[in-house]
Image (spheres, helix red, strand yellow):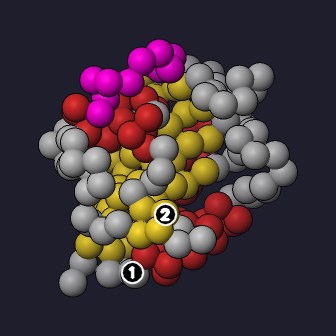
């Protein structure tokens, strides 16, 4: 039985848009079908401010993978695209987070679903609201639209496709 999942993708190194596109391509497989992808947003870094702005999007997918298998897939794609975990919250070629996995709640040392910070991050909620504004957080019992309305600050703008992204 396939589960509906939401993945948050972000990049702030090199060709950020190209990296997001490559990640979507590499995630797509027989057991993980990307259904829809949000608009790309350019967002200010949240916790470590002295770095390049991120490009972020949210992908909606159907998968037959179990949560830990999905985590393994996501981490393999990150590694294939040059992700190096050098500095916590630092610059990265690609970051892929499992935001929601159906209505499941998972709290293990390696994986927490829903993503523990998703409800506080505009760069997650804004693109997620495009795809699933009525999706309810299984712990907080609030919709994506309600959580987005409560987020303050956090600079964000829609990414212009013609922008130079090789800075």
> SS of the residue at dot 1?
loop
Please provide the residue range marked out in magenta.
Answer: 147-157
Which of the two discs, 2 and 1, sits closer to the camera?
2
The answer to whether residue 165 shows anywhere in this view is no
Report the disc number at residue 65. Answer: 1
* Residue 102 picture location, percent across and down: 26, 66
Could you tell whether 130 is left or right of 11 in the image?
Answer: left
Which residue sits at x=46%, y=34%? Answer: 121
Picture coordinates of residue 43, whole percent (x, y): 54, 25
Q: Check disc 1: other Cα within 10 Å, few if <14, some if 14-19, many if 20+.
A: some
Q: Is residue 107 above or below residue 6?
A: below
Vertical relation: 148 (above or below) 72 = above
Depth check: 161 or 37 in front? 37
Q: Which mark is residue 84?
A: none
Q: Nearer the viewer, residue 72 or 141?
A: 141
Residue name at image x 44 percent, y 35 percent = 120
Indicate the quadrant where residue 10 lies: top right
First in sequence, mark 2 or 1: give its number.
1
Q: Is residue 39 above or below residue 141?
A: above
Whether 33 is among the magenta residues is no
> Residue 145 location in percent, x, y?
22, 33
Q: Residue at x 28, y 47 (%)?
A: 140
- Residue contact at pointers 2 and 1, CB within 8 angstroms: no
When asked about the image quadrant of residue 109, the answer is bottom right
Would residue 116 be seen by someone viewing this image from the given angle? yes
SS of the residue at dot 2? strand
Real-space CA distance between mark 2 and mark 1, rounded to the nearest whole angstrom: 16 Å
Q: Position of residue 165 (x, y in %)?
A: 64, 27
Q: Is 19 left, or right, of 59 in this rendering?
A: right
Magenta-drawn stretch contains 156: yes
In this view, the residue farthest toward the left is 134
Q: Which mark is residue 112?
A: 2
């Amino acid at each position: 039985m396939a589960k509906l999942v939401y993945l948050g993708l972000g990049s702030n190194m090199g060709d950020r848009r190209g990296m997001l596109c490559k990640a979507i391509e590499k995630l797509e497989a027989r057991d993980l079908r990307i259904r829809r992808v949000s608009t790309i947003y350019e967002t200010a870094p949240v916790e470590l401010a002295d770095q390049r702005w991120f490009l972020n999007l949210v992908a909606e997918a159907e998968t037959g993978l179990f949560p830990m298998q999905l985590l393994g897939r996501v981490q393999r794609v990150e590694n294939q695209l040059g992700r190096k975990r050098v500095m916590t919250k630092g610059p990265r070629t690609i970051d892929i987070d499992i935001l929601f996995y159906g209505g499941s709640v998972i709290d293990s040392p390696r994986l927490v679903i829903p993503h523990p910070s998703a409800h506080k991050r505009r760069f997650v909620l804004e693109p997620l609201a495009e795809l699933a504004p009525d999706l309810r957080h299984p712990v907080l019992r609030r919709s994506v639209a309600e959580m987005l309305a409560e987020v303050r600050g956090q600079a964000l703008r829609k990414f212009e496709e013609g922008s130079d992204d090789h800075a």
